[in-house]
Image: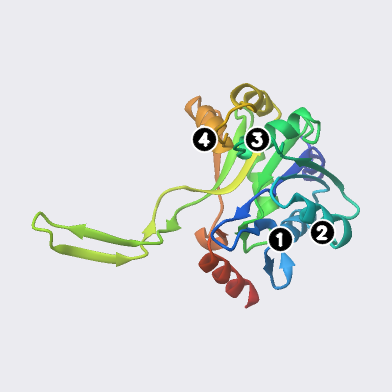
Amino acid sequence: MAGASYEQEVSNTQVTIMAGGQAKRMNNEIKSLLLINGVPLIERTLRQYYECGFRTFNILAGFGHEKIEDYLKNDSKYAKGVGLRTSIDDPSWVAAGKGKALKLAIENGVIDRKKRSIIVHPDDVFFSDSVPEQVLKGHLEKGSGYKATIVTTSGTEYPYGEIVVDSKGTVEKFIAKPFVKKFTHTGISVVEPEAYGEIDRLIDLNSNTAQEFEKVVLEKLASERKVANFTIEPYDVWMSVNTLKEYETAKARLEK
């Protein structure tokens, strides 16, 4: 949309929230309903995008979708007064994956084929409320020619100890939790409508194996040089909540 204002670009953008995660390493809780400061992760996501002007939201859910839908209908502040549509994973799937969830949402009309999507995950926690605006503007600055933009940090803290060992088996160096300087995907992807055709083509809803959007679609588009990168700073503005320890760390940071 050449010459379009930020407000116009926001209106042409839908926020697609992947809310089907199960916290298998946290007593099988529904990830998107995990509380930080008494607020579910999905509500934090809705708030951050709402406050940056977004008003069209798609909820893609599977495990625990009844409780998620109930929360959004009865308790969410930010789900009220916005365009919100929900797509539920097919219960007959032997294995799902984000790719299947996205393709189903496209086929059933929950995802509008005419609008770009910012694909987000509630368990990717961002400590800056300006990230949604940064992401959209960063994507738009890349210009045409790309079907998607992946949002990264400049690196991440490796959760293990790095060890350098000599030929005799003697440890020459030990570094606890080193910072690894590699672009790291934060879980946010921005896809233009042209990418929906790739999801249609590459994702098999009848597969007995999980179809992951990143593995099946983004890797293919990247090999064709159709994916741009946008890096947010500082690197620790983002963290993924996949374990109880990460959950406690995120809570501690946000409670300050």
User: Which residue type carries mark 4?
Assistant: Lys
Mark pair 1, 4: CA separation: 26 Å
Q: Residues within 10 Å of mark 1 (few under 14, many from 20)?
A: many
Identify residue for label 3: 93
| Pointer 2 residue | 71
Per the image, label 3 sits on a secondary structure element best described as loop
Q: Could you classify mark 3 by the number of other residues whose Cα lies within 10 Å: few (under 14), some (14-19), or many (20 or more)? A: some
Q: Choose top left, top right, bottom left or bottom right for residue 217.
A: top right
Kindly identify the residue that appears in the image at 79 percent across and 58 percent down.
51
Q: Residues within 10 Å of mark 4 (few under 14, many from 20)?
A: few
Give how far across and how far down residue 77 sits, in percent. 85, 62
Distance in Å between CA atoms under marks 4 and 3: 19 Å
- Does residue 2 appear in the picture of this structure? no
State which tag comes first along the sequence, 4 or 3: 3
> In this rendering, is residue 193 above or below 132?
above
The image position of residue 14, as x and y in percent, is 77, 41
The three-letter code of the residue at mark 2 reads Tyr
Question: In the picture, which quadrant includes the N terminus?
Answer: top right
Q: Which residue is mark 4?
A: 215
Q: Amino acid at mark 1?
A: Leu
* N-terminal label among 1 and 4: 1
- Judged from the image, the secondary structure of the residue bearing numbered disc 1 is helix
Chain-order first, disc 3 or disc 1: 1
The quarter of the image holding the C terminus is bottom right
Using the numbered discs, state the Cα–Cα distance from disc 4 to disc 2 in whole angstroms.
31 Å
Q: Nearer the viewer, mark 1 or mark 4?
A: 1
